Image (cartoon, rainbow, N blue to C red):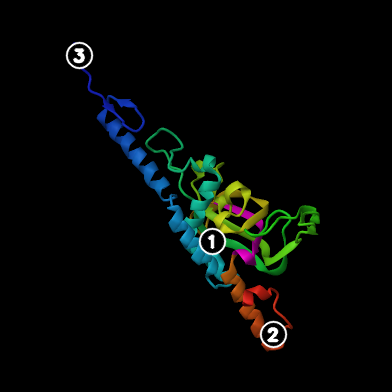
Amino acid sequence: MSQITVWKCDNTGKLFEDKDKYQAHLRKLARERNTKRKLTVVEAEADAWWARAYETEMTIQEWKQFVINNQARFWAEAAKADPHDWSYVGKSHNRRKSGVYCPIPELLEFTTFDVRWNPAVSNSHSCPHNGVTNWGGKEQIDGQLAPRNYPGWSGRVEWIVKWPEEWDGVYLGSDLFKGLFGQGGRQRAHTGTGGGGMRYNEKHKCHTQSFGYDFRMYAADWPGMARAIAKEQMMQVLKGERTSIDWAEAAL
């Protein structure tokens, strides 16, 4: 009577007659776990980090670099907003040893960041975390017409992420500012009309996906940045370059 030795994976229940294939399977699972672990942030710690971020005084151009420097936080929030597509992270595109694993996107740069202070940013499709949207200007609050805009920043942004060509068709990089249920999430930044594509990037010597969208942020969501704007405008008032600041609450 022949006796066969098999190895069983406790995680998946799969059986392997070949020890090398069993060990390769365990390594694959470990890679998946390690990649996905990077997207996991303890909620209480994340709340505290974002609370500090909102209060940090910086210009909109400094915020652009802030996003690049802290992109892991933004991707972690994006993964919560779209669990279906982000479930690909850590998985191979085929069963062969040469299979390429789906990575977390790497934000390389903003190729366009044409975003400026705007005292009347539309709230037709988005709003501050403590505000309301007002499509068509017909919404009411306690019998009064709701605001039709809020102070903040608006314009257009375009960015590129490093991305393997084997995973073309999966556009996780577009989720950079996406929050839960289509709202701004902890990122508190909103994208509108736009889209993306993929190509080989000579500058970065890798395949990249590019994305471009209309963009909105609200002062109430980023009080530290609002204070920076108020201080800048106050100096302009003192110099006689303007007569008032746009958002008085920010100066308090």
**Taking 192 as reference, is 99 above or below it?**
above
Amino acid bearing label 1: Glu
Indicate which disc, 3 or 2, sits on the residue closer to the N terminus. Answer: 3
Residue tagged by mark 2?
237
Indicate which disc, 1 or 2, sits on the residue closer to the N terminus. Answer: 1
Neighbor class of circle 2 (other Cα within 10 Å; few <14, some 14-19, many 20+) is: some
Image quarter of the C terminus? bottom right
Image quarter of the N terminus? top left
Residue furthest top as drawn = 1
**Taking 218 as reference, is 212 above or below it?**
above
Name the residue at 56% across, 71% down: 224
The residues tagged by marks 1 and 2 sit, at their Cα atoms, a distance apart of 35 Å
Amino acid bearing label 3: Ser
The residues tagged by marks 3 and 1 sit, at their Cα atoms, a distance apart of 61 Å
The residues tagged by marks 3 and 2 sit, at their Cα atoms, a distance apart of 92 Å
**Taking 213 as reference, is 121 above or below it?**
below
- Looking at the rendered structure, the secondary structure element under dot 1 is strand
Residue tagged by mark 1?
109
Magenta residue check for 239: no
Magenta residue check for 220: yes
Residue tagged by mark 3?
2
Decide: marks 3, 2 in contact (CB < 8 A)? Answer: no
**Taking 102 as reference, is 23 above or below it?**
above
Decide: marks 1, 2 in contact (CB < 8 A)? Answer: no
In magenta, the rendered stretch is: 209-221
Q: Nearer the viewer, residue 103 or 46?
A: 46
In percent of width and height, residue 75 lies at 50, 53
Indicate which disc, 3 or 1, sits on the residue closer to the N terminus. Answer: 3
In percent of width and height, residue 145 lies at 79, 59
Name the residue at 34% across, 27% down: 14
27 with respect to 197 (left or right): left
